[in-house]
């Protein structure tokens, strides 16, 4: 997804706080009706899938056993769909054409629960809450994933002043960090208190995109010229080394004050294939660029069990970076060389990390791999009927 640079303008925000307890009924739209409960020919409930992994393909979802990678269920679902952990050990959020739907990955079925929303975007999990952002309305929805089940959980909503491609995160103290923008431009963030009154804001973040949280609940938000860090009640701007240095995708870890980000420096490129990543120190407010010697994509960034930075390169290797020193300490073989497609919705290898295991998809061979991060050993693999695209799973135990 490309976003051009835009001049900053002031943005006003309005507030809406509501509790939602309604159970969303099934609609008649194509994307919803295509995802009926899977048929059970045995007449008994499907055997639960242990620590499931979920990947999308053109036309549906695959649910796999997290240890063996055995294919447990093929769930038809039309359209381009995206998947994210819901925040518990059972469910996955599926972004469809009508909103955020809830997949019971353990039970291998789409539930009747849906958070309706135009152009569903980012899904964030933090401090025991799951936060959804609907780009088409600017609505933020916050709920406790422990309440997910057959009915829609009680939720809290906030509506941005203008619809935009945004993101929000709810902190442990109840504060809400949310983006500022319109359909034409995105300029920064606002921090709202528990009463949803504004505490502080910054409009020094052109093209604001993506978020990550580091140790001690430091929030990092990406910009086209660096990042914003919100910590201890204050916002700090960290500028990129160049006038244009876009950071739009980040990966954080509670184990580290460092946030891993991508780094693009060619504003005019149709598709830049960057070979540098960024490391943002949320304690010092400094940024370090690391050259990994190969390109990568927005699905390439993750963090390991000890906070190590992981990047899946187009050379087919997982590059392990010590976030403190910025040194590449290991390169774990995973796939053969590959190239990023021009269309961001087209399949490309993806990296998903849970506990000590890295899951890697390989659309060209229609395979999915599981790699033990510390040893670098491939512990499981499977061949799929169709090329996998997005990759996710339930939260680790």
Image (cartoon, grey):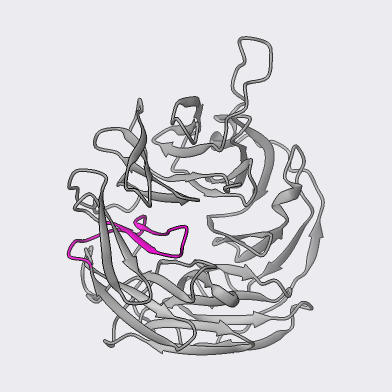
Which image quarter: residue 157?
bottom right
Q: How many marks?
A: 0
Quadrant of the image for the N terminus?
Answer: bottom left
Q: Position of residue 379 (x, y in %)?
A: 37, 36
- Residue 132 among those drawn in magenta: no
Q: Is residue 7 visible?
A: no
Q: Position of residue 254 (x, y in %)?
A: 55, 68
| Residue in front for this viewpoint, 326 or 103 | 326
Which image quarter: residue 331?
bottom left
| Residue in front for this viewpoint, 246 or 138 | 246
Q: Is residue 132 above or below residue 205?
A: above
Q: Is residue 208 above or below residue 383?
A: below
What residue appears at the point 45 percent right and 30 percent down from the top-left corner? 68
What residue appears at the point 50 percent right and 46 percent down from the top-left corner? 83
Q: Position of residue 31 (x, y in %)?
A: 54, 37
- Residue 293 among those drawn in magenta: yes
Q: Is residue 212 visible?
A: yes
- Identify the residue at the far front of this view: 375
Q: State the predominant SS element of the stretch in magenta.
A: loop
Q: Is residue 182 left or right of residue 21?
A: left
What residue appears at the point 30 percent right and 32 percent down from the top-left corner? 366
Q: Position of residue 304 (x, y in %)?
A: 43, 58
Which image quarter: residue 367?
top left
What residue appears at the point 68 percent right and 11 percent down from the top-left corner? 43
Q: Is residue 272 left or right of residue 118?
A: left
**Magenta-drawn segment:** 292-312
């Amino acid at each position: 997804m490309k976003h051009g640079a835009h001049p900053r303008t002031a943005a006003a925000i309005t507030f809406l706080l509501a509790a939602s307890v309604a159970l969303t009924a099934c609609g008649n739209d194509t994307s919803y009706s295509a995802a009926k409960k899977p048929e059970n020919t045995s007449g008994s409930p499907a055997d639960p899938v242990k620590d499931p992994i979920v990947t999308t393909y053109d036309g549906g979802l695959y649910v796999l056993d997290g240890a063996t990678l055995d294919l447990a269920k093929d769930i038809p679902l039309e359209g381009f769909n995206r998947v994210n952990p819901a925040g518990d050990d059972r469910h996955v959020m599926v972004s469809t054409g009508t909103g955020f739907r809830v997949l019971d990955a353990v039970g291998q079925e789409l539930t009747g629960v849906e958070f309706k929303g135009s152009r569903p975007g980012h899904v964030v999990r933090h401090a025991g809450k799951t936060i959804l952002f609907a780009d088409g309305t600017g609505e933020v929805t916050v709920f406790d994933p422990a309440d997910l089940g057959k009915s829609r959980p009680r939720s809290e909503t906030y509506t941005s002043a203008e619809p935009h491609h945004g993101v929000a995160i709810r902190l442990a103290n109840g504060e809400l960090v949310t983006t500022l923008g319109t359909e034409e431009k995105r300029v920064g963030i606002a921090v709202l208190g528990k009463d949803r009154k504004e505490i502080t804001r910054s409009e020094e973040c052109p093209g604001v995109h993506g978020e990550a949280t580091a140790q001690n609940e430091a929030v990092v938000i990406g910009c086209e010229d660096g990042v914003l860090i919100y910590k201890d009640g204050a916002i700090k701007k960290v500028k990129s080394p160049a006038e244009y240095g876009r950071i739009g995708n980040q990966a954080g870890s509670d184990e580290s004050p460092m946030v891993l980000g991508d780094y693009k420096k060619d504003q005019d490129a149709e598709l830049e294939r960057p070979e540098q990543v960024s490391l943002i120190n949320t304690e010092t407010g400094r940024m370090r660029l690391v050259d990994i010697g190969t390109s990568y994509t927005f699905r390439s960034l993750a963090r390991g069990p000890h906070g190590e930075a992981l990047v899946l390169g187009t050379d087919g290797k997982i590059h392990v970076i010590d976030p403190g020193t910025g040194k590449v300490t290991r390169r774990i073989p995973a796939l053969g060389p590959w190239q990023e497609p021009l269309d961001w919705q087209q399949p490309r290898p993806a990296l998903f990390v849970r506990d000590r295991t890295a899951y890697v998809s390989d659309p060209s061979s229609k395979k999915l791999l599981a790699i033990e991060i510390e040893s670098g050993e491939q512990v499981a693999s499977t061949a799929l009927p169709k090329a996998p695209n997005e990759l996710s799973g339930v939260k680790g135990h």
